[in-house]
Image (cartoon, rainbow, N blue to C red):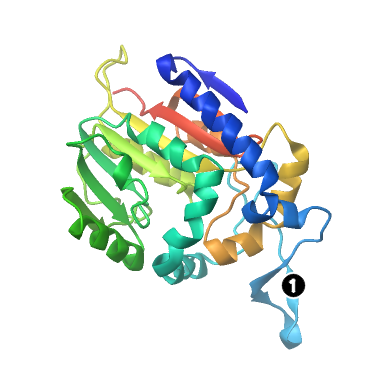
């Protein structure tokens, strides 16, 4: 794993532990993660890409080496439907995978950095809710109504005061929040699912409080994402070959250039950590200055 940071501070040992534990678990549980079963195989057929006479065409990867986002091989409407269909069993399907790969610890470490008025974008089923500092003023949003309903059920059964609502960060009119209205904006495993992740990040930056020209007083964006590895070409090749079938099932592209997307959106990276052979990215960033 790689750690690139300006101010990791006293929490660096925690990240080392997460990386060592998660990396070892990812290697040992390759089949569960989805990489091991794909070694040496041909690209799988996309279940939504039927050709003539009912045959299915092999899908191209969603990443183009010339850019950060690439083409889209699975229609957005189908990917969004995947999230609605997954909502009832989403937590159950991810729980053990996230435990053994250390992702639950990474969620905890990132969420504990949230301060002030917090917005979580693409909150899914609310898997981060238990990791925020006590007393956090949280607004959680997602474009999937089915996911939002799971979130609301969790809030109802807890003592947390969380405002959960349907909101689409990709909407042409933008989200229904004023510019600079949040101190912290959180996105975990969301950049892989947006049709235009650069535009989505810029919208998150719009609603995040900006600092002055000296960089003081600004808010932060906390990102936990998965994407292509720049350090392990063999793994990136696997992600590229199987991007479309993965997107069809899970609604996300796991081979996007996360760091490139963040930089293209104009954000300044304050801290960056990489785990799982460079495919899991923990990023603290700040929006452009006023």
Disc 1 element? strand
Q: Residue furthest right?
A: 40
Q: Is residue 86 left or right of residue 257?
A: left
Residue 257 point in image, percent of width and height: 60, 40
Quadrant where the C terminus sits is: top left
Please determine whether, in this image, residue 289 is positioned above or below residue 251. Answer: above
Viewer-closest of 11 and 255? 11
Q: Residue at x 81, y 61 (%)?
A: 42
Residue under the image location 33 percent in, 22 percent down: 289
| Residue 31 shows in the view | yes
Taking 217 as reference, is 281 above or below it?
A: below
Instruction: Using the image, determine if residue 262 lies above or below residue 15.
Output: below
Query: Is residue 62 something one can see in this rendering?
Result: no
Q: Is residue 51 left or right of residue 224?
A: right
Residue identifier under label 1: 57
- Mark 1: give few (<14), some (14-19) or many (20+) Cα within 10 Å: some
């Amino acid at each position: 794993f790689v750690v690139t940071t300006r101010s990791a501070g006293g929490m660096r040992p925690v990240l080392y532990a997460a990386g060592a534990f998660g990396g070892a678990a990812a290697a040992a549980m390759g089949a569960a993660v989805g990489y091991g079963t794909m070694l040496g195989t041909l690209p799988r057929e996309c279940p939504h890409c039927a050709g003539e006479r009912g045959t299915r065409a092999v899908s191209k990867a969603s990443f183009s080496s010339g850019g950060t986002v690439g083409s889209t091989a699975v229609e957005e409407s189908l990917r969004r439907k995947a999230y609605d269909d997954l909502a009832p069993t989403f937590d159950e399907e991810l729980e053990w995978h996230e435990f053994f790969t250390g992702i639950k610890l990474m969620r905890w470490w990132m969420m504990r950095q949230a301060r002030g008025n917090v917005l979580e974008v693409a909150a899914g089923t609310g898997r981060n809710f238990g990791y925020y500092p006590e007393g956090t003023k949280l607004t959680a949003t997602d474009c999937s109504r089915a996911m939002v309903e799971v979130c609301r059920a969790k809030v109802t059964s807890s003592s947390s005061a969380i405002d959960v609502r349907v909101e689409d960060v990709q909407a042409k009119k933008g989200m229904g929040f004023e510019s600079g209205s949040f101190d912290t904006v959180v996105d975990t495993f969301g950049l892989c699912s947006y049709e235009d992740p650069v535009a989505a990040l810029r919208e998150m930056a719009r609603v995040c409080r900006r600092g002055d020209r000296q960089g003081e007083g600004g808010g932060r964006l906390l990102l936990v994402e998965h994407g292509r590895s720049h350090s392990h070409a063999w793994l990136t090749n696997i992600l590229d070959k199987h991007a479309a079938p993965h997107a069809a099932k899970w609604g996300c592209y796991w081979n996007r250039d996360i760091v490139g997307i963040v930089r293209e959106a104009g954000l300044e990276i304050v801290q960056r950590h990489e785990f799982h052979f460079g495919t899991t990215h923990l990023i603290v960033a700040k929006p452009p200055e006023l």
